[in-house]
Amino acid sequence: MYAARRALRAPGVWRRAFGGGGGGDARVTRPATGDVPQPSEPIALESPASAARVVQFSDEFVGRGFARSDIFVHPAFVSSDEHDLLVRSCEKKLRRLAGAYAAGHFDGRIRNYRECSVSAWLPHRRGIAGRVAAAAGRHADPDPPDLPDRPPTARASGWTAVGKHDGQIRHILDRVWDLLPPGLAWLPPHILDLHEDGEILPHVDNPDYSGFVVGGLCLLGPAVSTFRHVDDPAVRVDVLLEPRTLYFMTSRIRYQFTHEITLRPDQRVWRGQPVPRARRISLMFRDAKEPAAGWGSLAA
């Protein structure tokens, strides 16, 4: 997958994954105090009141003082029309870029899936090049004009440079990125299409491949995602991810909790009601790791 993942199978895996004891980037080293890497600009996400019906914190999570704000869940973040536009656009990208479903992934963490990244949906100012330009005192390259406003030519309908709805989708996704600190540099949105018979096994997203936050915009079918502390699985959060829901993992949940969406029967029930197995698409959001010397160090 776009951001490589590692399963936490043994006590030493944490040290290898986070670079402890071997030099490496201090931003992803787990200090002895149990602190986790934090961005220079604080992340202040607060779930709306509507999230209460789709998030369950275990007694152990609450009793040990973990921050509920480390998991952000916003049901109905996009409208039904926006959801449908995103689904149609994701389908087109997947057909062109991803092909058939894959039975398994090289790290063994995901089954029956397909995926692709869409650089055209990331505004230039929000990506790595935009952060490098800003650090160097330059303007980021302009985005292509929104295609519905582009006049057709004699030889083509006007949709030849990028996808027909890419501009509209950038405007929708801007609302996602506006929730986070403006200093973050974002990787291109990543489409993860999970088959009805697909599953994501417990893992922590590899901190060598992305930064402080991992999130997703949920499309098509519902699913229950479970987040468990790597040292104590009783410390957990369960989230019902309905279509149109936006979620983000930050701080300890991003770095110290596994997450999973499996085919186990206990993950197909929410508060006594069955959650039907269905194909689902997640539009994934990850920030890029900033070099230790800052984005300006990448300026030519």
Image (tube, grey):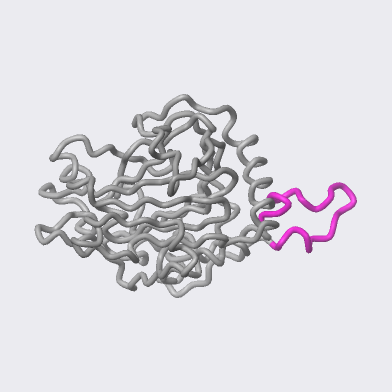
- x%, y% of residue 259? 34, 45
Q: Main secondary structure of the magenta part?
A: loop
Query: Which residue is situated farthest in the right direction here?
Result: 154
Q: Is residue 220 left or right of residue 147?
A: left
- Asked if residue 287 shows in the view, the reply is no
Q: Which corner quadrant holds the N terminus?
A: top left
Query: Which residue is situated farthest in the top direction here?
Result: 103
Q: Is residue 110 left or right of residue 167?
A: left
Q: Residue at x 27, y 64 (%)?
A: 293
Q: Does 270 appear above or below 148?
A: above
- x%, y% of residue 219? 58, 48
- x%, y% of residue 2? 44, 42
Residue range of the region highlighted in magenta in the rendering: 145-166
Residue 7 lies in quadrant: top left
Q: Is residue 3 left or right of residue 6?
A: right
Q: Is 164 part of what is drawn in magenta? A: yes
Q: Residue at x 78, y 60 (%)?
A: 148
Residue 108 lies in quadrant: top left
Q: Residue at x 41, y 58 (%)?
A: 248
Q: Who is closer to the viewer here, 238 or 162?
A: 238
